Amino acid sequence: MKIMMIASECNPYVKIGGMADVVGALSQTLARMGHEVYLVMPRYRSIDGAKFGIRPFHSPMKVWMGNTEEYCAVHSAEDDAGVRLFFIEYENYFGRDGIYHDSDFNDYSDNARRFSFLSNAALKLCKDKGIKPDVVHVHDWQSSPAAAYLKSWYGNDPVLGNTASILTIHNMAHQGVYDAGDYDYTGLGWSNFTSDKFEDHGRMNFLKGGIAFADMVNTVSRKYAWETSFTEAGCGLQPFLRAKGADYGGILNGADYREWDPAVDKYIPENYDSENVRGKEICKKELQKKFHLERESSVPVFGMVSRFVDQKGVDILAGAIEGIVQTMKAQFVVLGSGDKGLEYYFGDLPGRYPGRIGSFIGYNNELAHQIQAGCDFLLMPSRFEPCGLNQIYSMKYGTLPVVRATGGLDDTVSQYDESQGSGTGFKFLDISSRALYYTVGWAVSTYYDRPAHMKSMIGEAMKKDFCWEKSAKEYLGLYERAVKKKVG
C-alpha cells in the first residue's frame, strides 16, 4: 500500500508532544512491513539538514492559497526504515524559533495560514511529482485541512481522485480554532464554512472540518474514543464524532522498544529483563543517589515524568505528596516543567523534605529513562489521557503504574486484584488529591505487606507487549476500509 503521512512534527526531526513519537514510529513500522511510506512536514529552522541528510528536491513549487500564489521549496531525505521524507521549506511560515507559539507560549497569529498551507502544499507535491497515495493520513488539527482539500479540490483529479483520507486525533483539547478572517486564504470555500464543517461559533475550527471530511477518523485508544463521543472529553465535538458512527474508533499507540526496554537501554546503569530483574536494584540505588534520597532499598520510590499542565494532573499530586511523605514511608522523584507555580512548588520540596523527595525542573531524556528503571511505581494522575506512553514504558521496566482510570491509561493498565495477586498497576477514578493519596497508600501497603503480589505483578507487567507492529496492522485495516469507502 502507498501511504502518505502529513504531520506538523515527527521524531527525531522535531518533537513537541506525543504525536511526534507516533508519527515517527508508525511510519517506520509500516515501511519495515513492506509498504511505500511518504511523510510530509515543515522544514523548521531547528531541523539540522546535514545531520539527517536532507537535500533539495523540488523548487520552486507554486501553491495556490485562496486567491494568493505562494512559492516554496521541497527538500527530501530517506530514513533507515525506508520512509521517504519531504520537508516543505517556506521561510515566512516555518523559519522561526518556535513551532506553534513564541517564547511566551502565545500561538502564532498566522497558524491557520501556516498549517493550511502545509496541508495544501503536501497534496500539490503529489500533483507535481505524480505521487498517487492510496491513503493520506493526517494528524490532529494541523494537517486536518488536507482531508477537506482532497474532497473539495481533488475529487476528480487523475492523481488524487481515488485517494482516501484518515484523520488521527491525538488530543481533542487542541482543535486549531482561529479567527475566520483567515478562512478565505484556505481556499476551502464559504460553502464549507458551516456548523457541521469548519464553522465554530463564528470562528474556524480545523479539527472539526477534518472530522467532517475525512473518510475515517480514529483516536489513540478505545476508551478515549468512547469518552470523546459521550463525555466532556469531546470538548464540544461529541455530536460530530458520534455522527461518524463506525467510521470513528480507537487504535492504541504502540511503544518503541528499541529505545524503551531495560534489556537494551543505554541510559540506565544496569540492564535487566523479565527473566532477571536484579539490575533493577542497581538502577534504584543509583536513582536514589542522583536525587539525593536516603539510600534505603527497602523503601518504595514513586516517580513522575510529566509536563506540568492541567491535563496531566500534576496539581493533584501537589495536593497529596506532602501528606503521603508525612504518613507513609515512601520516596518521590519528579521530572518535568511547565506551569511556573508548580515548577516552584516541586523545585522547593527537596529542601523541605530532604532525603524523601527529589526533583528536576526541566526535561532530561537520560533522567526519564533512569526514573523508569529505578522507581518501583510511576504516577500518572491525568485528568484525561488519549493514550499515554509512560505507563506503557514503565510496565516494560517493571515499574508499576499508579494512574487515573481514563483514556489509554484505563485501556493499558490492569487493576490490581488483591484476592488473586494479579494486575499490572493501581487505578483510581475521582479527580482528587484524596483519591490519589489513598491509591498511593494501597500501593505502599502492597509493597510492604504483599511482596509476593508485587513480584507477580512486576512479572505480568514486564511481559506485556505493546509493540508498534500490532497497532500498525490495525491501521492497515483502517486504511483498507477507507479505500473501499472512497472508491466504492
Image (cartoon, rainbow, N blue to C red):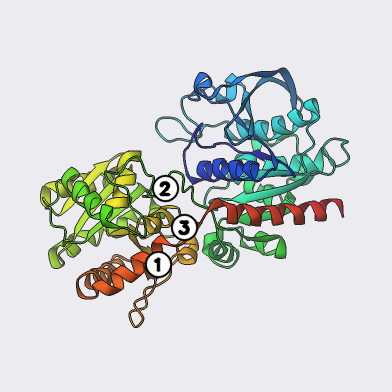
Q: CA distance from mark 2 to mark 3?
A: 20 Å
What amino acid type is highlighted by mark number 3?
Answer: Glu
Q: Does the residue at mark 2 contact the one at mark 3 (Cβ under 8 Å)?
A: no
Which disc, if any, is residue 460? 1
Q: Circle 1 — which element?
A: helix
Location of residue 86 in the rendering, given as x and y in whole percent from the top left corner = 64, 28
- Compared to 390, does 189 lie above or below? above
Q: Circle 3 — which element?
A: loop
Q: Quadrant of the N terminus?
A: top right
Location of residue 352 in the rendering, given as x and y in whole percent from the top left corner = 11, 50
Location of residue 35 in the rendering, given as x and y in whole percent from the top left corner = 70, 43
Q: Residue furthest front?
A: 275
Q: Mark 1 or mark 2: which comes first in sequence?
A: 2
What amino acid type is highlighted by mark number 1?
Answer: Glu
Q: Circle 2 — which element?
A: loop
Is 244 positioned to the left or the right of 414 in the image? right
Mark 1 neighbour density, 10 Å: few (under 14) some (14–19) many (20 or more): some
Counting every numbered tag in the picture gives: 3
Q: Residue at x 49, y 51 (%)?
A: 255
Q: Residue furthest bottom?
A: 419
- Compared to 57, does 285 lie above or below? below
Q: Does the residue at mark 3 contact the one at mark 1 (Cβ under 8 Å)?
A: no
Between circles 2 and 3, the one closer to the viewer is: 2
Q: Mark 3 or mark 1: which comes first in sequence?
A: 3
Residue 261 shows in the view: yes
Which disc, if any, is residue 94? none
Residue marked by disc 2: 260
Between circles 3 and 1, the one closer to the viewer is: 1
- Residue nearer the viewer, 181 or 357: 357
